[in-house]
Image (cartoon, rainbow, N blue to C red):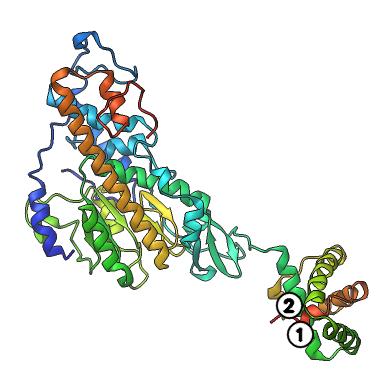
Amino acid sequence: MARSRLETVGSVFSRTRDLIRAGVLNEKPLWFDIYNAFPPLREPVFRRPRLRYGKAKAAIQDILYPEDRIRAFVEKYIELQKLGETDEEKLFVETGKALLAAGVILRRVEARTQKEGGHVSWESEPTGVKPQTVLEKNQPLQEVPQDQHLETSEEQPKGLSPP
Amino acid sequence: MVPAATVPRLLGAGVWPRPLRPHLLQSATPGRARPGGRTLASAATPAVSEPEDSIDVSDKILSQPLKHSDFFNVKELFSVRSLFDARVHLGHKAGCRHRFMEPYIFGSRLGQDIIDLEQTAAHLQLALNFMAHVAYRKGIILFVGRNRQFSHLIETTARNCGEYAHTRYFKGGLLTNAPLLLGPMVRLPDLIIFLHTLNNVFEPHVAVRDAAKMHIPTVGVVDTNCNPCLITYPIPGNDDSPPSIHLFCRLFQTTINRAKQKRRQMEALYRLQGPEGLGARGQGLAASPSLGGTHSPPEGE
């Protein structure tokens, strides 16, 4: 069977078709008609993989969900907590006491209020904060949780309750 | 299977009773009046005479499945949900990404690439359909995969299909220098299916390039770090998780067995119908596996 071993020139199909047309290949291969009837979505032509230079980046977006904002807030909160913010601690202690009074039920309410607070906080936040950027930038983050604490105090125990 | 075991079967494969190539004869045969005054149900078939001539019968057997978009009904074998449950959408980390896989990637979740399952479903349907047609036409299929974790699974899959597998070290000229390595008059595979496109050192498998050289179409599961350029029917999907590879092997096995069974049915059909003269009934029966015979036109099976 005549073949052209040039895998970089065209696709398998184009080379076989042209060989048949030229009369070099006498017998049609088994898969030829099937490929004709059901071609693939992309013709399998060889492409040389080139590196990207400069600032060119792939057009692939990150997958982020609304819950990631809440997670980002929680991570921020815990981190700032370690720095030792006194205002937050006071409110923290108060909500801690309320937690002791009624544990599970409060948590559910907290979740609801936290969601509502979350909604309110989304409007107040200027831009979406990605969880990866939490540890990098501290200064803008300090402003944001303070705004949120002014609006809702029930959000803070959420920082305590996650397992 | 070890290459040595494939030698006698490949050598013997050339002895298969293959009918004469009917495609080159089509222009020669003029249309004739049907015997018994029966007309064909679909007018799309070319004017091929239908006596008990074996060439025309085999032509009918071969040409008919190509008219339906999904003759073997491969769509019902999987769904986007089943692909998701088998973790087919999970790719490698963003640093391993191959540039040519970017169109098939949905996005990146915390650094891990997620493959777009809508595209995977479309590609998988095309690939399974092609595979089924090749098996229907009694083509030789070779399963290749170099991940040692699944080499036994691939070999058992090939054995269950009645096809061939090569999951060991791929010797240099196995496809390109076949007469020397495997003996004279060896029939090369008509389709190569890659469960893993990369070899053990994360380079493209030699068989991808060699199949392109030898005009052999390929079907392959391409992960986010693979090069899908030379693969005829790529299937973007996970090739590292066990559930994913088990799903693919199951799908391939079912498709090939289904296609071979269909072929046996069609041959039995035309053998029985031969003395009576082929008519609409032959086409109606092609859709249903039973030999009861209905006059309904074949649906897009």
Chain letter of the residue carrying label 2: A
Judging from the image, what secondary structure is the residue with disc 2 in?
loop
Residue that appears at 20% across and 14% down: B30
Q: Which residue is mark 2?
A: A134
The tag on residue A79 is 1
Residue B23 in view of the camera: no
Disc 1 to disc 2: CB gap under 8 Å: yes
The percent coordinates of residue A120 (x first, y second) are 87, 64
Above or below, B171 against A104 in this view is above
Q: Quadrant of the N terminus of chain A?
A: top left
Q: Earlier in the sequence, mark 1 or mark 2?
A: 1
For label 2, the crowd category at 10 Å Cα-Cα, with few meaning under 14, some 14 to 19 and many 20 or more, is some
A117, B172: nearer the viewer: A117
| Picture quadrant of residue B34 | top left
Looking at the image, is mark 1 or mark 2 nearer the viewer? Answer: 1
- Disc assigned to residue B85: none
Please tell me which residue is depicted at 80% across the width and 87% down the height of the picture.
A81
Amino acid type indicated by mark 2: Val
Total tally of numbered discs in the picture: 2
Residue B205 visible in the snapshot: yes
Helix, strand, or loop for circle 1?
A: helix
Above or below — where is B21 with respect to B74? Answer: above
Amino acid at pointer 1: Glu
